[in-house]
Amino acid sequence: AVAAGLGIMHHRKISHGLQAAIRDEQLETQLVFSWLRNLRERTQLLYVVVGTDEGSARDAALGRYRKLIGESARLADQLQHIGRLPGDERPLLQVLASARQSVKLENEVLQLALAHSQSEAIGLLASRVVPVHDGFQKALYDLAQSRRTGVTGAVASSNRTASELVILITGVGIALVILTGLTTVLIIRRGIRTEGALQFEKELAQVTLHSIGDGVITTDAGGLIEYLNPIAERYTGW
């Protein structure tokens, strides 16, 4: 029973941890897809900045780009504050490294574009930034997959624990049934032995009373005669 109780407490602890891991996976998935949208829009805005000479369009693109950079920093911070599963740290570090590299190269592209070196900016964007963005996207997908794999493993482990707990509780229940049955048998046997001993003592008393030379009469609590030995029968005529 103690083992079953400890097993139940352990399973509850695992279940609470699993629920937290599932919530973390859902949050991380949302953050990953938000970052992917953020990255795609930043790439489009960079092409606008390096590909147009129209001041207002470039300024609007730059303003939106700066907001996306701020959003990207917040997404990175939120991801780092999510609880990590075993083996989940390396994919996160790769994502953060790709994010830093992307921002660094994007700034170089913007500096060239604002310095009116459009051809160099376009060349850097195509040759360096786009491949880094591709690697960044892969790192984000790998992070999400790593989390999903970890949660799947945790669910399988929880299911195994639950099955083992059911087996344990069932075994304890069977043991209790057997113990109860044995206890009942022992009580019945002891009762039978006690009843037999009392009957033997009663018969022995009757034989003794029957055989003594004095007249013997026994009555119940109400004074009604229950027994007369042969001598008492001769004396009383009953």
Image (cartoon, rainbow, N blue to C red):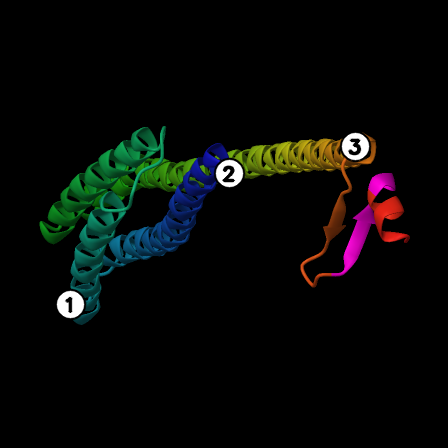
Side of 25 where 201 appears, left or right: right
**Residue that carries the numbered disc 3 in the rendered image:** 213
Using the image, determine if residue 146 lies above or below residue 115: above
Mark 2 or 3, nearer chain start: 2
Which residue is more in the foreground, 181 or 80? 181
**Residue that carries the numbered disc 1 in the rendered image:** 55
Using the image, determine if residue 130 lies above or below residue 43: above
- The nearer-to-camera label among 2 and 3 is 3
Dot label at residue 158: 2
Dot label at residue 166: none
* Amino acid residing under circle 3: Gly
Mark 1 or 2, nearer chain start: 1
**Crowdedness near tag 2: few (<14), some (14–19) or many (≥20) residues, C-alpha within 10 Å:** some
**Crowdedness near tag 1: few (<14), some (14–19) or many (≥20) residues, C-alpha within 10 Å:** few
Q: Quadrant of residue 225?
A: bottom right
Is disc 2 placed on a helix, strand or loop?
A: helix
Q: Position of residue 20 (x, y in %)?
A: 37, 49
Side of 186 where 199 appears, left or right: right
Side of 13 where 238 appears, left or right: right
Q: Please state the extent of the stretch shown in magenta in the rendering.
A: 224-231
